[in-house]
Image: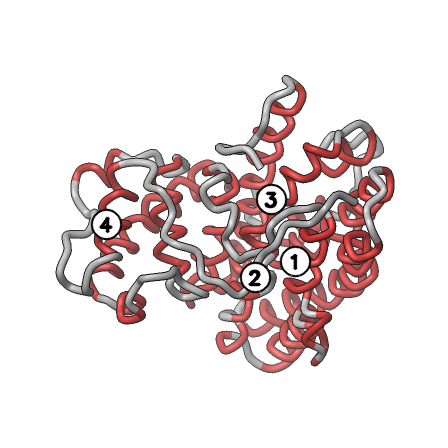
């Protein structure tokens, strides 16, 4: 397609620009020695919108210390007790809001079955990009999704040691595919970086963090929240099932959109790979992970349903924001590409 930009995908990005008092205090602390700065746990945090830019960016930065971190941040911050206390306060605000706003099912079977029904007149982002979207909108979508796709499957690995028996084996089998089945060049995050390069986007990890909205941050933060807490293992499994069930048809539409714009095979391959792989993964997750987990721990049924509901809720909010901006001819990003 267009000329690609030079990039170093392995380079660590600097800390992002703060979006309020809470994220500002956190970013300021992280450039200092661990234990030498005041972290946000006071009234400003209690007043922060649980879905807003300030809280979501602060939470994303806290979680990122468990992934690749940021340039100039001491590794000791990852397990700093003061930072963990601040993160816990952020998590409680976010999780309470999700439980209040997103919960619609008690039964995971009903929640999952509803996901299996593809609407004949779908109006989501992938439908829009396939049927009427413009190239600049597709590039914005890829920039948003890069916050997750460049660490695709990483948040889900945390649940594996919390599962047992067939559920653990099935989850590990799906993750093995996500990580390239032993081939580094087939790791899905690497394939997404190639897609970005084909679309003249910078594939550097977290490059578009400052440009993406709170709604995209919330999608990624929920994965990290569920993955890091053993108590939320059922919700993580429900979330993961939602991703795998909805991925195959959406990926097919996005592959069609990329072909419509004349994208190269490297770009198209990322989504065609997901069409085939995730159709299989859907069955494995539903029967090998969810069913087996609930045989051992039936008390987690409501949590699995919550994971489905919360994922749908946050993805719908993101889609509403993107489509609303695009239909008005506006950028959905905080900064231009």
**Classed neighbour count for the residue bearing mark 3: other residues with Cα under 10 Å, few (<14), some (14–19), many (≥20):** many
Cα–Cα span, label 2 and label 4: 25 Å
Q: Establish if 204 lies above or below 17.
A: below
Q: Which residue is mark 4?
A: 28
Circle 1 SS class? helix
Q: Quadrant of the C terminus?
A: top right
Q: In the rendered structure, which disc, 1 or 2, sits on the residue that comes first in sequence?
A: 2
Question: Toward the viewer: 226 or 87?
Answer: 87
The label number, if any, that marks residue 9 in the structure image:
2
Residue 284 placement, left or right of 264: left
Kindly indicate whether the residue at mark 1 contacts the one at mark 4 (C-beta within 8 angstroms). Answer: no
Looking at the image, can residue 239 be seen? no
Q: Which residue is mark 3?
A: 143
Cα–Cα span, label 4 and label 1: 30 Å
Residue 104 placement, left or right of 13: right
Question: Toward the viewer: 247 or 134?
Answer: 134
Colour mapping used in the image? secondary structure
Q: Residue at x 34, y 47 (%)?
A: 58
Q: Tell me which corner region of the image, top left, top right, bottom left or bottom right, holds residue 78.
A: bottom left
Cα–Cα span, label 1 and label 3: 11 Å
Residue 249 placement, left or right of 76: right
Q: Which residue is mark 1?
A: 193
């Amino acid at each position: 397609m267009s000329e690609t930009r030079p990039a170093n995908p392995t380079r660590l990005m600097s800390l992002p620009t703060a979006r309020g008092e809470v994220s500002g205090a956190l970013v300021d602390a992280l450039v200092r020695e661990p234990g030498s700065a005041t972290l946000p746990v006071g009234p400003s945090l209690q007043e922060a919108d649980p879905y807003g830019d300030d809280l979501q960016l602060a939470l994303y930065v806290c979680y990122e210390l468990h992934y690749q971190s940021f340039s100039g941040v001491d590794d000791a911050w990852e397990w700093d007790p003061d930072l963990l206390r601040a993160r816990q306060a952020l998590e409680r605000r976010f999780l309470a809001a999700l439980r209040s706003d997103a919960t619609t099912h008690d039964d995971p079977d009903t929640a999952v079955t509803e996901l299996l029904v593809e609407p004949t007149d779908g109006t989501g982002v992938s439908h829009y990009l396939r049927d009427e979207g413009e190239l600049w909108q597709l590039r914005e979508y890829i920039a948003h999704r890069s916050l997750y796709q460049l660490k695709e499957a990483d948040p889900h690995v945390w649940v594996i040691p919390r599962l047992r028996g067939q559920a653990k084996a099935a989850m590990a089998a799906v993750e093995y595919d996500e990580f390239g089945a032993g081939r580094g060049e087939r790791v899905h995050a690497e394939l997404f970086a190639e897609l970005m390069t084909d679309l003249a986007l910078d594939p550097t990890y977290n490059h578009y963090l400052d440009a993406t909205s709170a709604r995209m941050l919330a999608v990624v933060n929920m994965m990290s929240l569920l993955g890091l807490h053993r108590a939320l293992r059922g919700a993580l499994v429900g979330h993961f099932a939602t991703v795998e069930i909805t991925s195959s048809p959406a990926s097919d539409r996005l592959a069609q959109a990329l072909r419509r714009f004349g994208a190269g095979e490297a770009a198209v391959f990322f989504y065609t790979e997901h069409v085939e792989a995730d159709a299989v993964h859907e069955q494995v997750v539903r029967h090998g992970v969810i069913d087996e987990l609930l045989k051992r721990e039936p008390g987690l049924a409501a949590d699995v349903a919550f994971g489905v509901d919360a994922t749908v809720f946050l993805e719908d909010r993101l889609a509403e924001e993107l489509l609303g901006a695009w239909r008005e001819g506006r950028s959905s990003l905080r900064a231009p590409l």
